[in-house]
Structure formats: C-alpha cells, structure tokens
Image: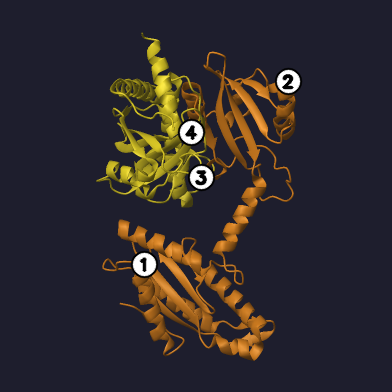
Amino acid sequence: MIFKQIADMINMGLVVLDEDLKVHFWNRWMALHSDIPADEIVGRSLFEFFPDLNEPNFLRNCRSVFTFGNFAFFSQKLHRYLFPLRPVYSDKTPFDYMQQSCTMGPIRCRDNRVQFLFLSVSDVTEVVKYEEQLVEMNSKDALTGIYNRRFFETSLQTEFKRSKRHGRALSLIMIDLDYFKRVNDLHGHQVGDDALRAFATRVQSRLRQSDLLARYGGEEFVCLLPETDGPAARDLAEELRRMTAETQWVCREVELQLTISVGVAQSRPEMDGFETLLKKADDALYEAKAGRNRVVCYD
Amino acid sequence: MSDTRFSTTEKDILQELMNIGFGQAAADLAQVIGLSIELSIPDIQLFKVCELSRHMAEKMAGEQEFSLVEQYFLGKFQGIALLALPARSGKKLVSLFGLQDQCNWSSENLEMLEKEAMIEVGNILIGACVGKITELLNDVVLFSPPRMMIQDVRDSILPNHLFAPGSLAISLKTVFHFERKKITGQLFLIANQDSIAWLKTALNTFMEQYE
C-alpha cells in the first residue's frame, strides 16, 4: 500500500514489464506525461504504444536483465530519450521531447528468479539545457559568436591527427586585421567591436561547413581547412584578402577601410605535431604583416 | 581483522566455481548479444590495495593502447570491475551492437558513439560475469552506471570508501575474445577485503550442497 503510494507520488517515471515485455505497472508520473492511463496500458505489450522501442538495442538490454539480472543504463547522451514525452516546460526548451536518463534492472521473485524488469525514467531536460549552454559558452567567442581559441586548438589537434592517419590534406590560415588599433583609437571600442563581428560574419559566410573559423586573439582569426591543400588554401586566403579590401565597411555609421594580412600553411608528412603547423602559419603571417594587405604561404 | 587466507581446497573450489560461472556467462552472453564469446579460465590473485598499479601493470604488460570501462558492484560481494579494451575496438563494437542505426545519431559525434559502445559492452560483460558468480553464491548485487576512464589503467587507484588503505583485495581476471569481430580484452573484477571473508563462507556453504 505504502509502496504503491510512493511509486505514484515519486517525481520520476516507473514502469514494470514482464518477460513478454507486457506492462505490469505504469506509475502516475508515466500516465501524466504520456497521456496514457495505467488501465489502458497495463497488460498490453509496451511496443503497441511505443513501437520505436522494438529495436535490437532495447531488446538486448531486456534480455540481459532477464538472463543475468543485469542493470542497463540508457544515457541521455546516446539515446536522448526512451519515451517520446512532452517536455514539462515545452515553451522554454529547445527540445521536442523530454530528455531522459533511464535505468533498467531486475525484480526477482522469492526463489531469486528474475520475474520482471523495472524501468526508471528521470527527466534531465533542464540539466541538458544548461550543459549545452555551458559547452557553447566554453567553445564560442562571446564577442563575435564564432569559435574561441580553446575550441580551435582542440580541433586542430584532432584534425592534425586525422590528416596524418589517413594521409589527407589539411591547411591553416591565420589572419590579422591591419592597423586595427587605429580603428579603436579613432572611433572607439564599440565601432571596433562591430567591425570584428562584421568581419567574422563575412568570412564565415565564405567558408564551407567543414571549415572552422575561430577568433585567435584580439584582431587575429584562424581558419582550419580540412581536406584542403596549400594551393586551394592560398586561393581562399587571397579571396578573403581581396574581399576585405574591396568591401565598404560601415559600422555604427562610420565608414571603415579594412585590410588583412594572411599567413597560410599546409600540413606536411614531416611535421611531427600540430604545433609545427601552427608555427608555420604564424611565421607566414609575420612575414605578410611586414607589407600588410597581402598573403604569404609557407612552402 | 577477518581471516582472508585461502586454503588450497578453497582456492580450488573458487577456481572451479569461477570456471562454471564464466562458462555459463559466456553461453548466456552468446544468447543475449547473438555473438560467440570466449572467456579464458579466470586467474585469481590476492594483493594489497596499495599495490593495485603494480598488479595491473604486471597483468597488462605488453598491451598496446587501450580504453578502460569502470563499474562498481555493491552487495556482499563488492568492489570494482575494470574492463580493458584495445583503443581502436570502439568502431568494431559500434557495428557489433548496431548502434550506428540510432536514429538520433549525427556523424560528428562518432567518438562519443564508440565510447558508448565500449560502455555498453562493459556493462553487459561485467553484469554477466559478476551476476553469475554472485548467483552461484546466493548474493544479489547492484551496479553503478559504467563509465569510461581517461587515465592509464596502470595509474588506477581503488576508491577509499570500498577499499580501506592497507587492506587486501582479490582480483579475478579473465581474457575475453569476440570471435567474429576479433576483439580481445581483459576483465578485472576486484573485490574488497570484506568480500574475501564473505567469499570464503559462501564457498563453504556452496560445497556443503555436494557433501
């Protein structure tokens, strides 16, 4: 009696299935969130109501509970959810369905045989929402909205390893906005900030989905270009240089003339680490900055 | 301090029980995952908790890079299970478990999928092996959610709340091999000193059935 009340009052979903995967118990939380009352679903196969669960992974976990008395954990990261339920605060969440963390385990009868399995369903939508916000804050540059240096460096390591392993091309472009301090000094930081945002948006629109644009420092940007060899990266760099110089930049009603210096490097078999590729692009940028408004490639 | 010495007969019984348990686990696993799996005859050793890294280093000598899944089991028999898989086996396990068909899957997160596949294999293998031993000895254990460890297995330390510093631990090791996928890994079940005492009593009770 007490346990039935607890099962119905608890703020999580509880489902009990028999060996034929028919619903034996469906708590009030499940009824309220799924709009399926217990008396409608109890005694019937779970798959009549949730056909998407009738797939090898779910069935394998059910078998492992009945065979070994095992526990199975359905993480939100991999599964998102087991039951397609509405999010509680549906107007304030980016998810179509409630994000869930579910656990499955055995319920034994007196002779210790596994007679039923239970499924507990926890609503983790809010936690996931905050987690995604944190991940975004940790990977994006607050001013421009493009990736930050930390994210770029992690991606560079991964892409460098991948290009080495598969012998695929990888190039890196480093960009510096020429005389940018003057923009800030002459027109104020708000105009400078707007210019950085406008420049990042413009460059981003020119890149492929697989390329990665990040803000590396104050007015320095980097483009990581997987599957791109040196000549193609040089062409892109040249196009960005021309595009920047030819654009009439207007920020907060101030007309600006911007130019960029660009260093380009491509990954080579003899490079022992991603740091070398970064150093080569940086060296090329240093050389480009000697003349301004130009592209230098490391060969 | 509880008596943790094993007589030769007790050792033989434990070895035999493990052979039976892991044999049954392998048969049941084949049925559950639809794949034939071999589990080697378990290797049983007692060691001091502080010597875990040395113990693991000895057992893992000669191994290449590997990934490690960790899971606690709690009951009268309690401790930690560590599953070491070759680092590159994630991809094979993804196809083995049909995880690539997950509808909510995006290709950018392949690494996470591989990690989840290893965690799932760990959960099933650990559950099967611990479950069978404890079933034979009439205990029921609870499991923590498995998790992937990032540090080197040779730097592993045992959690203080389960393993008192200076106490003894027992390690049951088996080498497993998925036939069709050619994946070989090692499973360590490391139980604490209280479990050793319980194990001795349970072994004797187990034998009484046959006397």
* Residue that carries the numbered disc 4 in the rendered image: B73
Q: Residue at x 38, y 30 (%)?
A: B4
Figure chain in yellow: B
Chain under disc 4: B
Dot 2 amino acid type: Asp
Q: Distance between the residues labelled 4 and 3?
A: 30 Å
Q: Which residue is drawn at 41% across and 81% down?
A: A285
Disc 4 is placed on an element classified as: strand
- The answer to whether one can see residue A207 in this image is no
Dot 3 amino acid type: Trp
- Residue B92, compared with residue A43, is above or below; it is below
* Residue that carries the numbered disc 2 in the rendered image: A39
Viewer-side residue, A175 vs A65 = A65
Q: How far apart are marks 2 and 1 (CA)?
A: 62 Å
Dot 4 amino acid type: Phe
Mark 4 nearby-residue class (10 Å; few <14, some 14–19, many ≥20): many
Q: Residue at x 60, y 83 (%)?
A: A248
Q: Distance between the residues labelled 2 and 3?
A: 35 Å
Q: Distance between the residues labelled 1 and 4?
A: 41 Å
Figure chain in orange: A
Viewer-side residue, A192 vs A131 = A131
Q: Are the residues at dot 2 and dot 1 in contact (C-beta closer than 8 Å)?
A: no
**Label annotation for residue A274:** 1
Indicate left or right for B57 with B34 as reference.
left
**Label annotation for residue A104:** none
Mark 2 nearby-residue class (10 Å; few <14, some 14–19, many ≥20): few
